[in-house]
Amino acid sequence: MRKLLIPILLIACLSSCKVNEQARDLPRVTFTATHESDPGSKTTLSENHVLWSAGDAISIFSTSCTTGEQYLINDEDAGTGQARFTGNSVGAAPYYALYPAGGGAVLEGSAIRLSLPAVQPYAASGFASGFNPMIASSSDLSLHFRNLCALLTVRLTGSGTVTSVSITSNKAESLWGTASVGLNYTDAPTLVMTDTADDAHCTVVLDCGAGVALGTDPVEFSLVVPAGSLSEGFTLKVTDDAQGSMTRSTSTPISLRRSVCSRMSPIPYVQTDSPFLNQSVYGVYTIDGSGPVPVKTYVKGTDQLALRYRLDSKTFRIQSLQTRSALLVTFPTEMEVGGSYPLTVESVGSTGVDDASVTATLLKSEGGRLWLQETSGNRGFIIAGEL
């Protein structure tokens, strides 16, 4: 056994040295790359990412290197619109290039097979670096990249902190997964999704990390999606950091053009589902990531309810004769779901609720009850619109 082991180890060492020697002898090559741009349009994807970023990498393919070779950006070119990328030679032209590098992409005949991710990270301006796939072909060392996808931008207003935004095709058209792009294009490349168009591939998610705060001005959330048509529209789902979510759907066909940003009209963020909205007991709650916590709620058999009408306002009252305390919330007579309104909160005796004047958004109106959430704060109110 020992006699056999020595030759085997020797062969392994010789093979390893041979590989390292070959890698060391490969010539280094530098390509110069530019982005696609359209000075006459303000909707091209390249306008959201006109500069190369530090750490960017591209894959270069050739007929003798179908799995591609990674080329890294020259450090001094980061932050420019034209950058040099250097790596090991892949042999003779023609050359085919893909951004970003990696992801298991391969050259298959006259096409490149690649993958689009199911989850993308949020970026404050357009899309995150490395998530807008581009392709280039060349007979020399100059590469002009063309965008492969479209950009769908959701614009949200209101209160709350958004942690994710997702788009789901109503017809189960694939929005992520394996794709192929032909290299024999004359004007623009066409990306074709090759995975089965099923429920597993019809949703793409924008991960907003710790969250993005909303306000009165629209905040943009952009998703890179395959160009084409959402023939039966899509369903939008927005989640927040208090376990709340909003779902909106449209059946109108949506056309998504390659290299074009489609911006939706601003949508007010109003929760359509959350642990707080599933509560039904009148009172005041603290709302955070751990769920709604009752601060002062109505106790049947002990407390009394009252609703006082005025000309343009109502005052809802929870009072206890045992503790000689009362909680009063005054609010406008006319309110609509999604609107923000002033509330006056008063406490008589010990209720655990501080007096305050706040602005709250009406999230839900059902069965005479009103669910409101403080716009700048973490309090929720379930009060009576009718008794």
Image (cartoon, rainbow, N blue to C red):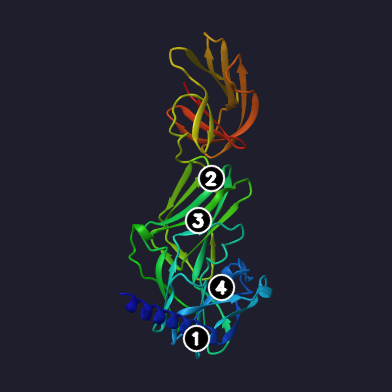
**Residue 35 appears in view:** no
Q: Could you tell me if the residues under marks 3 and 2 are in contact, i.e. CB atoms within 8 Å? A: no
As measured in the structure, the alpha-carbon distance from the residue carrying label 2 to the one carrying label 1 is: 58 Å
Residue 75 or residue 129, whichever sits in front: 75
Q: Earlier in the sequence, mark 3 or mark 2?
A: 3
Amino acid at the residue labelled 1: Gln
As measured in the structure, the alpha-carbon distance from the residue carrying label 4 to the one carrying label 1 is: 23 Å
Residue 218 or residue 297, whichever sits in front: 297
As measured in the structure, the alpha-carbon distance from the residue carrying label 1 to the one carrying label 3 is: 42 Å
Q: Which residue is mark 2?
A: 269
Image point 39% across, 62% down: which residue?
231
Q: Earlier in the sequence, mark 4 or mark 2?
A: 4
Amino acid at the residue labelled 3: Leu
Q: Residues within 10 Å of mark 3 (few under 14, many from 20)?
A: many
Q: Which residue is mark 3?
A: 206
Q: Residues within 10 Å of mark 2 (few under 14, many from 20)?
A: many
As measured in the structure, the alpha-carbon distance from the residue carrying label 3 to the one carrying label 4 is: 22 Å
As measured in the structure, the alpha-carbon distance from the residue carrying label 4 to the one carrying label 2 is: 37 Å
* Residue 218 image point, x, y percent: 60, 51
Amino acid at the residue labelled 4: Ala
